[in-house]
Image: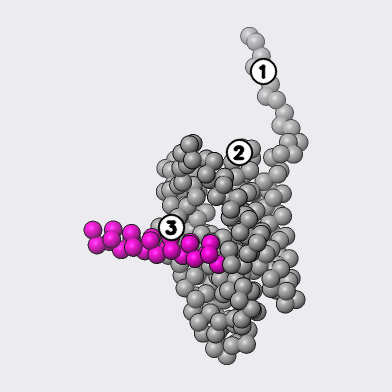
Amino acid sequence: MSELPKPEPESDTQPFLALLPNLVTMIGLCAGLTAIRFVLAGKFELAVILIIFSAVIDGLDGLLARRLKATSEIGAQLDSLSDFLNFGVAPGLLVYQFALAESEKMGSWIVVLVYVSCTCMRLARFNVTQNKAAVTGIKPPAHFVGVPAPAGAMLALLPAFVAFETGAEPAPPLLTGAYLLGVGLLMVSRLPTFSPKSLRVPKAKTGWIMIAMALVIGALLAWFWLSLILLTAVYGLSLLHSFYKAFRHGRG
């Protein structure tokens, strides 16, 4: 009777590329933490730039994990916790210190607490949805449910973009607080919102997409704050379109 082959012992090493997505996530986390440091130092423009950088990193780490087949439970949890800090805590503190701190008696800190809590709930709901899709094998919808956390952070920072571009004082605290509260509620809403994953680009149009990207990068380098205002406004228009579609579907 022949002996069964012995299982190969598990290796105590792994390829360095398997660590790359988590290392990229850590870079984004460090950027978010440093943004908070600059907020406390009153260097708001540098803080905003670091939050935007962390948003770019957030899209990169997940893409690397999928392409390198290096997804892991630890990586997913690390990414979620990093997103909470980068797109919840950091923007909330920045808007508070930049535009709301002088109106403490009006309850401005409560608005920040609501915004950060909404970010946390948005990320928790996303994680649950992804886990259910993995267990059941049912493909998640091509759209997001509610505004995703990185987009919510960019919307929350719009008052800062406008102030940096115009050189004017921040908007009145009451207006800024109401706006920040609205952004938080949009994140936890059930509104179907745009997801880049749903885009399909015809191969014949690839060159035009590259040219358009070059134009966007050039505009960001030449007119940074104005370009961010316009990009945020375009996303806001997409939300209005989503509201319109949801309203028509509800009436249909």
Image quarter (top left, top right, bottom left or bottom right) of the C terminus: bottom left
Q: In this view, does 6 lie to the left or right of 107?
A: right
Q: Where is residue 52 in the image (x, y as percent from the top left)?
A: 63, 61
Q: Earlier in the sequence, mark 3 or mark 1?
A: 1
Distance from disc 3 to disc 1, alpha carbons, whole Å, reads 53 Å
Q: Name the residue under label 2.
A: 67
Q: Which mark is residue 5?
A: 1
Q: Is mark 2 on a helix, strand or loop?
A: helix
Measuring from the top left, give residue 97's x and y in whole percent.
65, 79
Task: Report if residue 160 is visible in the image.
Answer: no
Q: What element carries label 3?
A: strand
* Point 43% across, 60% down: residue: 238
Q: What stretch is highlighted in magenta?
A: 229-252
Left or right of residue 35, residue 246 in this image:
left
Q: Residue 193 carries which label?
A: 3
* On screen, residue 88 above or below 2: below
**What amino acid type should be assigned to the residue bearing mark 2?**
Arg
